[in-house]
Amino acid sequence: MKTIKRLSLYLCLMLISSTALAQMYKWVDEQGNISYSDQPPYNGAKQLDTPPLPTMQATSVPKKNKPAAEEETEEATVYTSLAITSPKDDMTIRDNSGNFSVSASIEPALNTAQGHSLSLSMDGKVIKANSSSSSFSLSNIDRGTHKFMVMVIDKGGKPLLKSKSITVHLFRQVARRKQAQ
């Protein structure tokens, strides 16, 4: 198998090198037409010297520097408030499927152009991350008491602002079966 690969490589190299070394010929026929070819049609053809292929040095593309005004606007977004608006703190939610939504308000509006996003944590663990929406739909949450908090995260993953934590009590009714005796 290796010999077949090597043989095909050598054949390709020979074909490439033969085209690179090909001669060019020019002649004028009886009607005065000028013709060119890589093979002389008859003895009256003149061999031409092929000019070297033109080459150019690659140019490097300069890195874009952000204008000072842009850099200032990126640093200018300072969030003044972030709060969970729904559900209310210490609220009891009754849903047998464990589905509900958490909504937050933020001032000023979330600056997604700078890579900022919202993240929702439940009981100290992030459950929804990199959201541009201030509303989070949750499903199949276990019954019991849970603490929720929303954070504004920059593009590097650093928290910029955290909301106050709220407590939510989720009630999921369980139908108990009687044991067979």
Image (tube, rainbow, N blue to C red):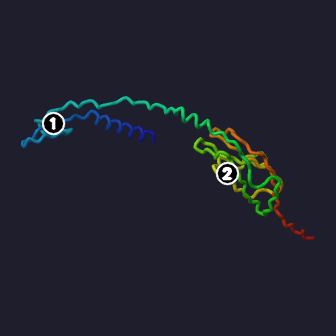
Question: Quick one: SS at disc 2?
Answer: loop
Amino acid on which the number 1 mark rests in the picture = Lys
Q: Is residue 80 left or right of residue 170?
A: left
Badge nearest the viewer, 1 or 2:
2
State which tag comes first along the sequence, 1 or 2. 1
- Which mark identifies residue 26? 1
Q: Residue 68, relative to residue 131: is it above or below? A: above
Which residue is at 61% across, 35% downward? 75
| Residue 181 image offset from top left, x and y in percent | 93, 70
| Residue 151 image offset from top left, x and y in percent | 71, 44
Q: Nearer the viewer, residue 90 or 129?
A: 90
Q: Which residue is outermost to the bottom?
A: 181
| Residue 146 image offset from top left, x and y in percent | 81, 52
Q: Quadrant of the N terminus?
A: top left
Using the rendered view, name the quadrant where residue 55 is placed: top left
- Which mark identifies residue 134? 2
| Residue 64 image offset from top left, x and y in percent | 49, 33
What crowding class fits label 2: few (fewer than 14 Cα within 10 Å), some (14-19), or many (20 or more)?
some
What crowding class fits label 1: few (fewer than 14 Cα within 10 Å), some (14-19), or many (20 or more)?
some
Q: Residue 169, relative to residue 162: is it above or below? A: below
Amino acid on which the number 2 mark rests in the picture = Ser
Q: Residue 121, relative to residue 6: is it above or below? A: below
